[in-house]
Amino acid sequence: MTTKRKGAALAVVLAITAAGALSPAPASAQWVVYDPSNFSQNVLTAARTLQQINNQIQSLQNEATMILNQGQSLVNQGKNLASLAYSPLAMLQQDIARTNALIAQAQGLTTQVGQLDQQFRQQYPSGAGANTSLDQTVAAARTRWNNSLEALSTTLGMQAQVNASITGDQATLSQVVGSSQGAVGILQATQATNQLLALMAKQTMQSQQLALAQSRATATEQARMLEADQEGQANRQRFQGAGVRYTPAPVQVYPQ
């Protein structure tokens, strides 16, 4: 209790006691005897009671403050556990699925590791054999030309798919950055960061797939050119080994 409160309480007690002592007693009442020790004891009891009341008030205030702090802590925990309402995962997975579908639909040389070696050896042998007919040579050359054309078509399709997804990626990036800047808790900030990383991973995967398709088209065309060169050499050797010679003959431009 502060000094001012103690003084006010003492003044109240003294005033009440004095008023009781000075008021006229009834005619039938007896004279009241003033006891200083009893008066002091009463004043001390009143002061202690007032001190207890003040202590209880202060305790209630502390408890109220503690409850408010706990409530604020729960609010903060709720914000930290709040999840983002937006997730671009489904759209990113759809883009990757469309790119994978283009690879799966690729014609020409297979993209399966277990079948590629056998198919390549059949369609790209080391030069034409001696018993290969002209029709077989033309059919094999046409097959290799189709392989190069299909590989190029797959590359162009993947380029178009990546170009189409750029617009969607820009919208996704804006949404994710906005969610990150407006995050109200740790969980939302973490989720926004993970979404940005997922967008970067998706773009990296598409870039790798596009680079693979371009490399496949380049390798297929180089293999076709090498096989055509080897076939040309084999056909020339076969022609020369057959003993056929060119015999010039006179040509009449203006026949008579």
Image: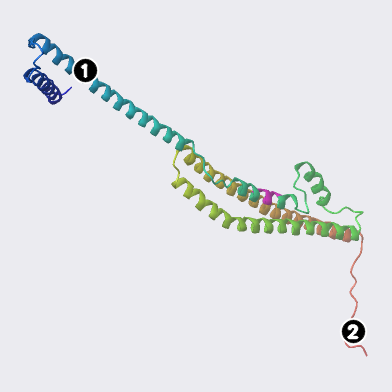
The x, y position of residue 243, in whole percent, is: 92, 61
Q: Main secondary structure of the magenta part?
A: helix
Query: Image point 71% across, 50% down: which residue?
Result: 101
The x, y position of residue 181, in whole percent, is: 44, 47
Magenta-colored span: 96-100
Q: Is residue 94 above or below residue 68?
A: below
User: Label 1's element?
Assistant: helix
Left or right: where 203 falls relative to 183: right
Left or right: where 68 falls relative to 141: left
Residue 173 disc label: none
Residue 181 on the magenta span: no
Left or right: where 232 falls relative to 30: right
What residue is shown with label 2? 252
Q: Is residue 251 above or below residue 154?
A: below
Q: Label 1: few (<14), some or many (≥20) within 10 Å?
A: few
Quarter of the rendering occupied by the C terminus: bottom right
Residue 115: quadrant of the picture? top right
What residue is shown with label 1? 49
Q: Is residue 223 above or below residue 188?
A: below
The amino acid type found where label 1 is placed reads Thr
Viewer-proximal residue among 199 and 8? 8
The amino acid type found where label 2 is placed reads Gln
- Cα separation between marks 2 and 1: 145 Å
User: Label 2's element?
Assistant: loop
The x, y position of residue 62, in whole percent, is: 30, 26
